[in-house]
Amino acid sequence: MTVTHDLSILSLISQASVLVQLVMALLATLSLVSWYWIFRKSFQIRSARAKTDEFERDFWSGGDLNTLYDAASTTRHQTGGMERIFEAGYREFSKLRSKAHDHTATLDGARRAMRATYQREVDDLEAHLAFLASVGSGSPDNGRLGTVWGIMNAFRGLSNVGSATLAQVAPGIAEALVATAIGLFAAIPAVVAYNRFAHDIDRIGIRFESFMEEFSNILQRNLR
């Protein structure tokens, strides 16, 4: 008699042991959550880059600093990171210039205000990247845990069989390997997205830092 086994993915998952199913469910949940943050971060970084480009065009077009500051203050919740850095620096600069006669202290205060805002903007862009890194590094190991456990159960079941055949071993091993496949499915997009987002955020951060230096030079010239 020839024994046939249903080796479809759904069948293998439904026939897996409880521990293997729990590992699969955990990996599937991590995959869904990571895809959610992949899309969220993609839109956030794209928006940050577009708003940075827009503000740089306005700033270097030769517009009045007071006009730019008033526009940034009015629509603060709709501005980009670079515009908020400009707003924080120019607000502190205007406040200190009207009260202090020490130009160095005025300029240092504006730089500190811009640096604090810069750090908040970068932290906001980097939020949840650690989660993607954890999914990328931990999912394969979780998948291998389910695979090892499933293979152990498959070979344990053969202990009660007089002669083992490939047809008897294949279903158990196949359902165990599904855990590894799900782990890789969760890990690969998370790793690729993490590396891409980290690179994009570094590039945006460099643009922020360059702007702070250039704007500091402009403020210094205004003091003179």
Image (cartoon, helix red, strand yellow):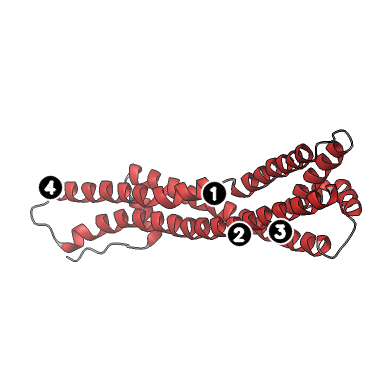
Element carrying mark 4: helix
The residue wearing badge 2 is: 203
**Going from the N terminus, do you reach mark 4 or mark 1 first?**
1
The amino acid beneath tag 2 is Arg
**Going from the N terminus, do you reach mark 4 or mark 3 first?**
3
Side of 208 where 194 appears, left or right: left
75 to 46, vertically: above or below: above
Residue 221 x, y percent position in the rendering: 81, 52
Task: State the CA–CA distance, disc 4 to disc 1.
Answer: 46 Å
**Going from the N terminus, do you reach mark 2 or mark 4 first?**
4
Task: State the CA–CA distance, disc 2 to disc 3.
Answer: 14 Å
Element carrying mark 1: helix
User: Who's the residue at 49% across and 52% down the image?
Assistant: 31
User: Who's the residue at 75% across and 48% down the image?
Assistant: 85
Crowd around label 2: few <14 · some 14–19 · many ≥20 (10 Å): few
Residue 66 x, y percent position in the rendering: 90, 51
Q: Which image quarter is the N terminus in?
A: bottom left
Residue 106 x, y percent position in the rendering: 79, 39
| Mark in front: 4 vs 1 | 1
The residue wearing badge 3 is: 47
The residue wearing badge 1 is: 129
| Mark in front: 2 vs 3 | 2
The amino acid beneath tag 1 is Leu
The amino acid beneath tag 4 is Ser
Whether tag 1 and tag 3 are in contact, CB under 8 A, the answer is no
Camera-side residue: 17 or 76? Answer: 76
* Residue 159, disc: 4
Crowd around label 1: few <14 · some 14–19 · many ≥20 (10 Å): many
